[in-house]
Image: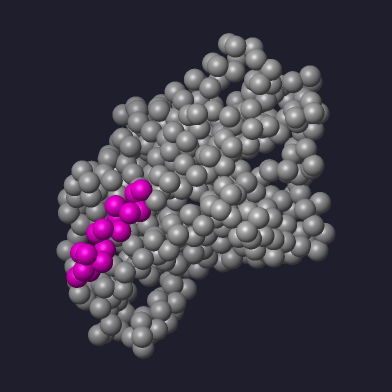
Amino acid sequence: MKEYLRFLGRSLRIGIAGDWRYHLWMTLLAAVALAGLNAYAKQLVHGLATTGMTDQVSWGLYIANFVFAEGIATALAIVVIVAYVYRRHELQDLVIFAEILAVAALLVCLAFVVVDLGRPDRFLHLLQESNFPNSLLAWDVIVLNGFLLLNLHLCGYPIYCAYRRRRPSRWFYVPFFFVVIVWAVSTQTVSAFLFVGLGSRPFWNTAILAPRFLAAAFAGGPAVLIPILWVLDRFAGHRVPRPAFATLRGIVAVAAIVHLFLLACEVFVAFYTGSAHGSSTRYLYLGLHGHDALVPWIRTAIVLSGLGLLGLLLPLAQRPLGRNLACLLLVAGLWIEKGMGFVVPAFVPSPLGEIVEYTPTVNEIVVCLGIWAAGALVYSIFVRVTIPVLSGRLTFDRPYDPNRPSALPAPAGSSGASREG
């Protein structure tokens, strides 16, 4: 225990140390996170009246970001499957960065649940006998916390073993990869059932919602990871083999095609049948009775997703700039479509036929930005500690020297020529 606490102390000191670029990045994230905390304090004082939510539209920007962040966390499953089930060795050295991304994304998820509840003490209501085990929301929160513990083990255990200069025990490490694959799929399935189970919201009542969630997650998560890995390769001194970028790009492209196909199927059913249950879809894409606040959002999402997918399929994606730009466009499109384009339209019109549009307030937006900044801050610190540990520059038996050459071999498939940028 003493050595473990020493490791945590050394990690904390290294996590906040760096050059001027790292300090500038961390300062910006900390400033945004503190601004979000201040906005949340205002919400605690004045209640959810500080948001744009109403009695008719009771879920807004918070749940929209929750759904998207959960997809990012779930996407690590596809990286684990490709790396260990299909034995793509170029990804095995990078799985740990996907695990760390999942931990940060899950912390963001839970933070959005807390701020959406209004008061933190309402969290206890989810676990009361009147809600558990009947409430899908209670199950969702439990599944998320279990998923967080799994990912903390899968990224923390090998890092600590590398710090102690010993190999991880396979029986205490590898089996959890297969558990996390099932758990990740279950997390997205339970969240989809949470929406599907609300019978008064026909916009969500579709049997393909869970596959849509999984396809969007498998597209968005690796699309976030690709630019991050490029930054680590270009600026953080961690060599990423070029085949890893090609593999991840292929995963993103296939998953994005499946997601857009499933989305097109739902749009076809809503418009071709002309059913009254398609009024929310018509409101989203065309507007309804002069109300069209979300139409620019969804059209922008379609354009961004299409451009991002096209960019990944073209030879331009073989270059780092083109690939990263395509990934960012796709991520932005998925965030809009799976967030504002998915959560809000189900409430318009209401079951009574009322059309009350939703517009997030400035305070609401600042809270969201603060949560994302806090998640990025956590991820930056974890990565800052992970790279020197995995490279052998930080071990239990000698002081940390950032200028010491790596004591471990470069990842399989990497070389000086494979470094991009």
For residue 208, side relative to residue 165 (left or right): right
Residue bounds of the magenta highlight: 167-182
Give the quadrant of the N terminus. Answer: bottom left
Where, by quadrant of the figure, is residue 322 drawn? top left
For residue 109, side relative to residue 5 (left or right): right
Image location (x, y in percent) of residue 151: 39, 60
Question: Could you say which is closer to the camera, residue 146 or residue 11?
Answer: 146
Outermost residue on the front side: it is 129
Q: Please state the total of marks drawn on the protein image.
A: 0
Image location (x, y in percent) of residue 414: 19, 52
Question: Could you say which is closer to the camera, residue 344 or residue 410?
Answer: 344
Residue at 49%, 55% (x, y): give it. Answer: 144
Residue 5 in the image: above or below residue 409: below
Classified by dominant secondary structure, the portion drawn in magenta counts as helix
Image location (x, y in percent) of residue 191: 52, 44
Residue 114 in the image: above or below residue 334: below
Q: Is residue 173 magenta?
A: yes
Residue 6 makes an appearance in the image: yes
Residue at 69%, 50% (x, y): give it. Answer: 365
Residue at 60%, 25% (x, y): give it. Answer: 299
Residue 221 makes an appearance in the image: no
For residue 33, side relative to residue 19 (left or right): right
Where, by quadrant of the figure, is residue 158 drawn? bottom left
Q: Is residue 383 magenta?
A: no
Image location (x, y in percent) of residue 370: 63, 58
Q: How is the image coloured?
A: one colour
Residue 351 in the image: above or below residue 109: above
